Every structure is written in C-alpha cells, then in structure tokens.
Image (cartoon, rainbow, N blue to C red):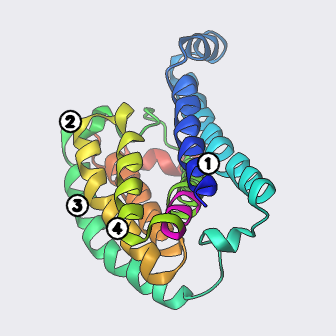
Amino acid sequence: MYQETVFSIVLSLLAYVFFLVIFYSNHISRTLSRKLGKEKSNIYRVLLQRGTGILVYGIIPAFLVSLAFSKKLSAYGLALKNLTESLCWALGLSLVIIPISLLTGKNPANHKKYPEIQTADWTAGLLVTSSLSWILYLFAYELLLRGILFFSCLRSFGLWPAVWINISIYTVFHLHKGWKEMAGSVFLGFAFCFLTYKTGTIWASLFGHIVLALSNEWASIYFNPRMKTKHIWKTK
C-alpha cells in the first residue's frame, strides 16, 4: 500500500542529493572557469544546474514511477482539467508575489544571490534562455514535489499528512539557499499544496512558482546597478 509513497519520498531526496553534487562541484566550476572565463562560466554553470534539475526532478522520476507503478502521469496531477480555475488561483497568487518581488529586487542583499546568473551583460538572448530554463526547471520541480510526491502521499495518508510531508521535503530542498528561504518555503509550500489539492493538478502551483522565479529575476536585474537594463537589448 505504501510502496509508491516510500518510493516517491526516497526518490525526491535522492534527486536533491544528486542536484547538490552538481551544485557544489568545484571540479565543474574550475573546468568551466578555465575554458570560458569567470563571467561566462557562471552563466553555463547555472544553466547546467537547471538542466540537472530538469533531468533528476522531472525526466527520471516520471519515467521511474510510470515504469514501477504502471500509472499515467495524470495520476500525479499532470492532467488537462480545471485549467481556468488553476489560472485564476495563479493570478490571485501573482498579485501577492509580484509586489514582494519588486521590494526584494531593490534590496542590495538580494543582489548577492539573484539573479542566479551574475552577469552585467544581459542580452535579449540570455534573458530568454534564462527564462526558458527556469520554466522547464520548475515544471520538473513541481512534477516531482507537487505531483509525484504529493499525490502518492495523498493516496496513502490523506490530506494533512501529505501536506506536512510535502512541506518538510520542500523545505529541505532549500537547504543550499539558506534559512530565510527555508522559512519562506514553509508558507509557500502550504500554498502550493492547497492549490494542488483544490484543483487536482499541478498547474496552479507551477504557474505561481514561475511567476515567483521570473518576477524575482527580472526585478533583481532591473534594480541591480551593475546590470543596466539597456544591456538586454544589445544584439551582440
């Protein structure tokens, strides 16, 4: 009865461990820096991290659970239903998220961490590439946490145990980002679980998460004095 749930919990934690291996790899950082230089190496290192997340949070877990439990991904919240309701919830959440992103984007302390790609030369191509990588990364992220993990726990334990398990693991996933983001992930994790349960899909939490990531990145670029917005429109 609990095989699917135990599998999803272990799979989630192993995926995060593997992500951390890539995230903290000095060998990768040194190799990229030696071949590309400091600034370009930062760009490719961040894109590599997000690509790793797409693989270990999305592609591999989706394949493994489909193979092990013979279920369609619609059983894990990847169903085309309640899209209007999901969009309405996401828009409502965005009204809270975007003003917060604008405030944090002005904070010099935030500029040390965001945008993750620390370069002054934000061309249009880089902005599009970063945004698309965020969207794909967060799709994989939400498929694992609010999809595979949440729905398997929901079937085994019911709503509240599934919510607290999800929030606990979601918080663990922010260990490398520090205690402030870990604390914030408790409240955001609750909101995402609520939206997932309410709509029966991952779309509302995914849309909300994308708005959070992109609004934070764009605000951080705009308000960072080292990152002039005119660089976005360079064609080189």
Q: Tag count in the figure?
A: 4
Say which quadrant the N terminus sits in: bottom right
Give the number of the disc on residue 168. none
Amino acid residing under circle 1: Phe
Q: CA distance from mark 3 to mark 4?
A: 28 Å
Residue bounds of the magenta highlight: 148-155
The residue that disc 4 covers is 160
Q: CA distance from mark 2 to mark 1?
A: 39 Å
Which of 140/169 is in front? 169
Q: Residue at x 38, y 40 (%)?
A: 172
- The first of marks 3 and 4 along the sequence is 3
Which of 34/46 is in front? 46
Give the number of the disc on residue 100. 3
Q: Residue at x 60, y 37 (%)?
A: 47
Q: Is residue 89 left or right of residue 106?
A: right
The residue that disc 2 covers is 109
2 and 4 marks in contact (CB < 8 Å): no
Q: CA distance from mark 2 to mark 4?
A: 36 Å
1 and 3 marks in contact (CB < 8 Å): no
The residue that disc 1 covers is 7
- The first of marks 2 and 1 along the sequence is 1
Report helix, strand or loop for mark 2.
helix
Locate residue 180: give its quadrant.
Answer: top left
- Residue 181: x and y in percent read 28, 44
- The first of marks 3 and 2 along the sequence is 3
Neighbour class for label 2 at 10 Å: few (<14), some, many (≥20)? few
Q: Does residue 227 show up?
A: no
